Image (cartoon, rainbow, N blue to C red):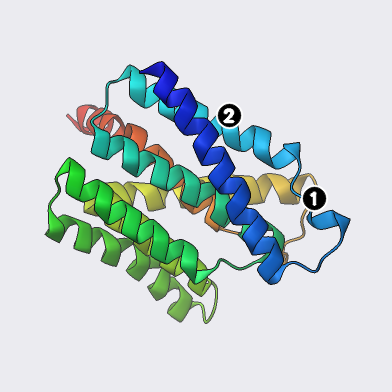
Amino acid sequence: MYVLAVAASFALTALAFWSVRLIEKKVGIGGAENKITLSFTVPAFILFLAGNIYFAYIKAVPGSSMLLNTLLLTAVVSSFQDLKYREIEDEIHIIALGAGIAGLLIKGFNPLDSFLGLLAGGGTLLAIAVLTRGGMGGADIKLNAVYGAILGLKLSLLSLFIAFTAGAITSLLLILFRIKGRKDVIPFSPFLSIGALTSFAFGGSIINMYLDVLH
């Protein structure tokens, strides 16, 4: 089983490398600065490997493993483009949603829960964008709608809480250490991905711990 986890991690790394190469060809400005180096592939492989070994250890069902890898690959590719170019290709959202639906069908799911998760994930950010008049980008809205569809309602709300908390702490640290200014824009998709991955892998345990504290 662990051999399959390693093989899947190599395959995902290759797919991520190929995906960002396509992104560079489409939106990159050309030149040596657009070469994909080990600074991208090594962290990506480590992330894929950690996720797949963990799910192999807990003996996750095939559908769950497919959903995890969909989230991992989407997180890596979307974060790369958002951090570098401040945009995310619509093809990423479409492919991720298709793979997510396939994984949910294999695993078994509640369509209504996925629909509510999509509304919560994308709708919350859409409301923020409207209220702040552009304080949230369209790419972030679409990305989190996909995450919400995969996670379902409860986990999508937890994902948002984690994302905003991580984003706020990171922004504060960047400002305190004068890496960023108060008016600088910080890409939010990496935090959305952190929230989605954390909720998917540990959301049930986090919610149960919270409920235990309440009681």
x, y percent for residue 148: 32, 56
- Residue located at (54% from left, 57% from top): 189
Marker count (numbered)? 2
| SS at badge 2 | helix
User: Which quarter of the rendered picture does the N terminus lie within?
Assistant: top left
Q: Which residue is depicted at the point 40% across and 66% down?
A: 94
Q: Residue 202 versus residue 6: which sits nearer the camera?
A: 6
Could you tell me which residue is drawn at 49 percent across and 74 percent down? 138
Contact between marks 1 and 2 (CB within 8 A): the answer is no
**Residue 4 at what x, y percent from top left?**
40, 24
Which image quadrant: the C terminus? top left
Label 2 is placed on what type of residue?
Ile
Q: Nearer the viewer, residue 210 or 61?
A: 61
In this rendering, which labeled residue sits more in front, label 1 or label 2? 2
Q: Residues within 10 Å of mark 1 (few under 14, many from 20)?
A: few
Distance in Å between CA atoms under marks 1 and 2: 26 Å
Q: Nearer the viewer, residue 178 or 2?
A: 2
> The disc labelled 1 sits on which kind of residue?
Ile
Dot label at residue 179: 1
User: Residue 40 appears at what percent x and percent y?
Assistant: 69, 42
- Could you say where residue 76 lies in the image, as x and y percent from the top left? 55, 47
- How crowded pointer 2 is (Cα within 10 Å; few <14, some 14-19, many 20+) is rated as some
Q: Which residue is identified by label 2?
A: 46
